[in-house]
Amino acid sequence: MAIEPAALAKGIASRLERLAEKFAPGRAAEVAAAGQRLRIEPASEPGRDAWLIGYDEQRALHLEQWGAKDSATQVRELLDDLEDRGEPGARKVREVLHRTLTMAAIDLKVPDEGVGVAVAVAAAAALAEQGHGLVQADGHGWFAPADGDVEQVLAE
């Protein structure tokens, strides 16, 4: 799945308002401002499909798309983590993981808490929607893209 910067920016911007209260409570104005300043640019890493998602003057998230080999390793680890989970959401996550061919990861740093998390989840949801996948947000759980928003499938 190729990452198209314009489509990714549009997918992020279309979700930010709804994701603000879920992932950056009380910071809706900052999240809205981040949506106005979005910039997607190549991360300039030879041999890697990597992008920077800038959301303010100083902060950018690092997005990397993983190929089949790296994705397969991660899928095995995630399936192992879900092995003892019997909730319906866990079954849904396992179903999606079993058909996963590629994955993307977005690196967050401590200063990205709040606004950066909302931007990262919006970016991941845009990619998941395109690839018929799910979003796994550390500390928050698993989410499915849903009409410009995300719905929790499985709590962490």
Image (cartoon, rainbow, N blue to C red):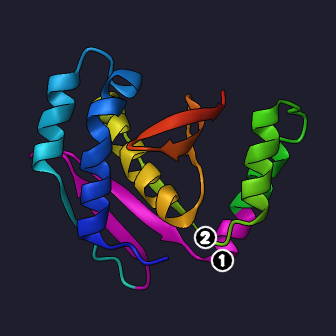
| Left or right of 134 on screen, residue 13 | left
Position of residue 69 in the picture relative to residue 6 (left or right): right
Q: What kind of element bears circle 2? A: loop
| Residue located at (9% from left, 46% from top) | 57
Q: Earlier in the sequence, mark 1 or mark 2?
A: 1
Q: Which residue is mark 2?
A: 102
Quick check: can you spot residue 145?
yes
At 33% from the left and 24% from the top, the residue drawn is: 24
Q: Residue at x 81, y 34 (%)?
A: 88
Please name the residue shown 49% across and 43% down the image: 146
Q: Is residue 58 visible?
A: no
Image quadrant in which you'd find residue 72: bottom right
Foreground of the two, 147 or 23: 147
Q: Position of residue 87 (x, y in %)?
A: 83, 30
Looking at the image, is 50 positioned above or below residue 76? Answer: below
Query: Residue 132, which numbered label?
Result: none
Asked if residue 90 is positioned above or below residue 72 in the image, the reply reads above
Residue interval drawn in magenta: 47-73
> Under tag 1, what secondary structure?
helix
Q: Quadrant of residue 144?
A: top right
Mark 1 neighbour class, 10 Å CA radius: few under 14, some 14 to 19, many 20 or more: few
Q: Which residue lies under the disc numbered 1?
A: 68
Residue 8, x across and y down, in percent: 31, 62
Position in image of residue 124 (x %, y %):
45, 52
The reply to whether the magenta stretch includes residue 108 is: no
Name the image quarter holding residue 43: bottom left
Asked if the residue under mark 2 is in contact with the one under mark 1, i.e. CB atoms within 8 Å, the reply is: yes
